[in-house]
Amino acid sequence: MAVAFKRPSALVTGSTDGIGVTTAKNLAAKGYNVIVHGRDEDRIRSACQTVRNFARDWTEGDGISVYSVKADLSTIDGTESLASQVKSLCREHNLNLSVLMNNAGVYSEDRVITPDGLELTFAVNVVSPFILTSRLLPVLMQQPKSRIVTASSISQSRFIGNWNDLDYTKRPYSAHAAYSESKLFDAMLTAEFAERLQKAGLGTDRITCNCLDPGTVNTKMLYAGWGPIGIDVESALDQTWLCTDEEVENTTGKYFMSRTESWSQYDEKQRLRMWDLLSKLSPDSAAQWELDVLTCTSVEATR
């Protein structure tokens, strides 16, 4: 008896413009159902149509479906809402979520404090991926194999400037410093997620977790912080590569730059300090992560 084809699905956060919509388009062209995420209804609607139109020009893109979710990732409640919406979509439409692309990010020229009392860059670039990855793990683990990919950056810091002042209350606010530190946190978070999964017995044959520098790309973020010094956004294909390519299907816990494993922060003490910090900010997500890993491990043992 022939096995029915189960089309994979991918969630790309922050996918209404820039590298996000480019990644969503190219995943659709490779045959993935795509969940587009944004904050504005009109921009979400436009991005969904852009993804559909692009996919039609590719053989593998024939028959794909595009879905949308609206959520503000600057707040803990907003990120939890996104996770809930995605879970509901997967149940309602029988979607096989096998890729989580944590693409959404901000570069804030001004110091902004969120309703949760967090500096905006840290909230969107670090806390949100922690919560979303934790909450969507059981959905991802329902598939034979899944990938978690997070956008870090070549501009990531080598160290955290002040662990006790991440909201820049005591030190002068620097947009570059806040952004660079957030991208170091993303690399550390990737390594920690990967190690915890492997220690639980969830190997790379089931799930991988990596991050990357998506390239120096002419996006609104690059314009704001550095100017138009990058490549055209249509050429920004490294995220799609890390989400899909067989070359890296069994690689986990790594940071990639130009599709090559590069330096990243793997210091265990620093990673554990970060995990403790994020767990205190969102204890429900941390507890859910531990429960989901335990549950997934138990399911694996019965396979």
Image (cartoon, grey):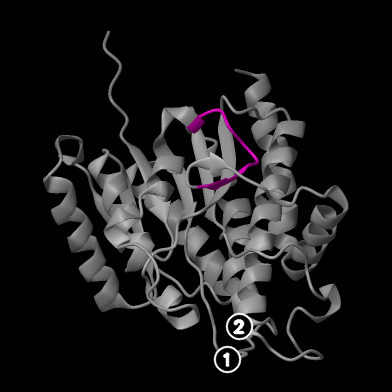
Main SS category, magenta section: loop
Report which quarter residue 160 is drawn in. Answer: bottom right
Dot 1 amino acid type: Asp
State the residue at coordinates (71%, 32%): 198
Residue 110, numbered circle: 1
Q: Residue at x 54, y 83 (%)?
A: 108
> Is residue 67 at least partly visible in the picture?
yes
Spatial CA distance of label 1 from label 2 is 7 Å
Q: Position of residue 217 (x, y in %)?
A: 39, 64
Residue at 64%, 70% (x, y): give it: 180
As drawn, 67 above or below 174: above
Q: Judging from the image, what secondary structure is the residue with disc 1 in?
A: loop
- Compared across the picture, whether 114 is left or right of 229 comes to right
The residue lying furthest to the right in this view is: 269
Dot label at residue 175: 2
Q: Is residue 119 above or below residue 297?
A: below
Residue 289 at what x, y percent from top left? 69, 49
Q: Which residues are magenta?
A: 248-257
- Which element carries disc 2, helix, strand or loop? helix
Relative to 86, residue 229 above or below: below
